[in-house]
Image (tube, rainbow, N blue to C red):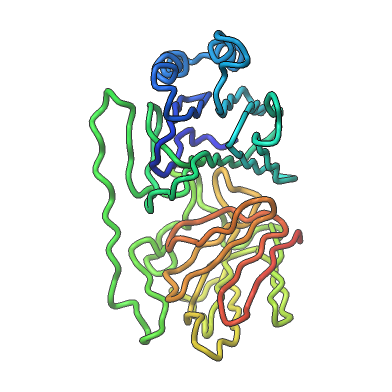
Amino acid sequence: MTDDLSWSFRSGDWLGVFGANSAVVLPPSEKSQAAVLWELVDGGAGYEQILDVLLASGLRAVPDFVLVSRKGDLTRVLLRGSVSAHFATADEVVHLDGSGDLTWVERTLTGVTRMRFDVSEEPPAPDDLVVAGGLVRISSAEQPPSTVAVVVPAPAEEPEPAPVLEPDPHLEDDEDATRIGVLDPVTLGAPLPGIEGQPAAPPVTSRPVARLVVAEGETVDVDRVVLVGRAPEPRRADTAGAPHLVAVSSPHQEISSTHLEVRPGTGADHGSAVVTDLGSTNGTLLVQPGLPPEDLKAGVAVQLLPGAVLDLGDGVTIQVVNP
C-alpha cells in the first residue's frame, strides 16, 4: 500500500472512522458505535480488536459496515450489507459487494495500491475532501487521496487552508485549446507530479511501464511523457527525454490541442503509468477494469491499470495494455 495514509472522501450521511492503519464505515444510525470505534482506531487498534467491538452485541445486531485494516503488505477487509469496496494491486482489481451475502464478505489482499468504498445511495457531494485521521460523514472514500483540494485534519487540530489553483491565461493557444494552470509541470519546468518527498521519474525509463493502443491504430510505449491531442505540443525545449506526441483526429473539435498526458508514475505509482487530463475543454472519461467510470479532474494524476480505456471524445479511445 502507499505510504500516504490519508483518505479522500465525498461527504454524505454515513460515518467514516479513519486512522493510520484501520478504517471503519458505518450507517447513520450507529453514532454511538462510531464514537467508540474512533477511540480504538485512533489508538492504533488492529483488525481483531475492532471486530470484537463490532460483534459485541451479536451477529444479528451488526449493521451494514466496512472494516479494513493494514499490516505490512497485507490488507484485510470485511464488509456486510449495502456497501461495496474496490481494491487495486499490481496484478488485479478486486470488487467486493456485501449486499448478496447473509453474513459478510471477508478477504485478505497482498500489495494493495489503491482502495475505494461506496456506501451511500444518496447523490455524493461534488468535491473531494481529504482526512488524515478522524470521524467524518461520507458517501465514498478512497486511499490514496484522489485530490488535494481541501485538507480535513483530525478533530483536535485546526483546519489548514486549501491551496488555490489559478489558471494561467497566457498558456491558451486558441479558442479550443487546452487550458493549463499552475499544476502543469511541463509548462513550468517543475518536477513531474508524484508523491511529495519522492524523487521525480527520469525523463526516459529503462523499459516501458505500459503501452497505449489508440483507436486509430497507433501504438505508443510509455517510457516517458506521452502527450495526446489534436495537435499536441511539448511545453518546454526538446531534450533527450522529449515527449512522445500523439496526434488524433477530431472532426467535431471535441478533443483539445493538447488533451492529456500519460507518463511513468513516481512514488507509490512507480512501475505503472499515470494519466492526467490537462484541462481539456470536454474532459476525459476513464474506465478501469472492475471500477466505475471516472471523469478525470484537470491536473490530478490517476494510476492506470492494465485494460483501462481512456475516452477523449469524437470516437477516440486509448486502451492501456502491458508492454
For image coordinates 67% across by 38% down, the residue present is 96
Q: How many marks?
A: 0
Q: Nearer the viewer, residue 120 or 171?
A: 120
Return the x and y of residue 316 as percentages of the image width and height: 62, 78
Q: Vertically, is 270 above or below 165?
A: above
For image coordinates 42% across by 38% down, the residue present is 138
Q: Is residue 98 left or right of residue 267?
A: right
User: Which quadrant of the figure contains the N terminus?
Assistant: top right
| Residue placed furthest toward the front | 60
For image coordinates 60% across by 83% down, the residue present is 248
Q: Nearer the viewer, residue 247 or 133?
A: 133
| Residue placed furthest toward the bottom | 251
The answer to whether residue 22 of the structure is visible from this angle is: yes
User: Which quadrant of the figure contains the C terminus?
Assistant: bottom right
Return the x and y of residue 228 as percentages of the image width and height: 56, 75
Return the x and y of residue 9 as percentages of the image width and height: 43, 42
Which image quadrant for residue 222?
bottom right
For image coordinates 54% across by 55% down, the residue present is 302
Which image quadrant for residue 75?
top right
The answer to whether residue 143 of the structure is visible from this angle is: no
Q: Vertically, is 118 above or below 205?
A: above
Which image quadrant for residue 298?
bottom left
Q: Is residue 219 left or right of residue 38?
A: right
Return the x and y of residue 48 as percentages of the image width and height: 61, 13
Q: Nearer the viewer, residue 153 or 205?
A: 153
Q: Nearer the viewer, residue 204 or 121?
A: 121
Q: Vertically, is 320 above or below 198?
A: below
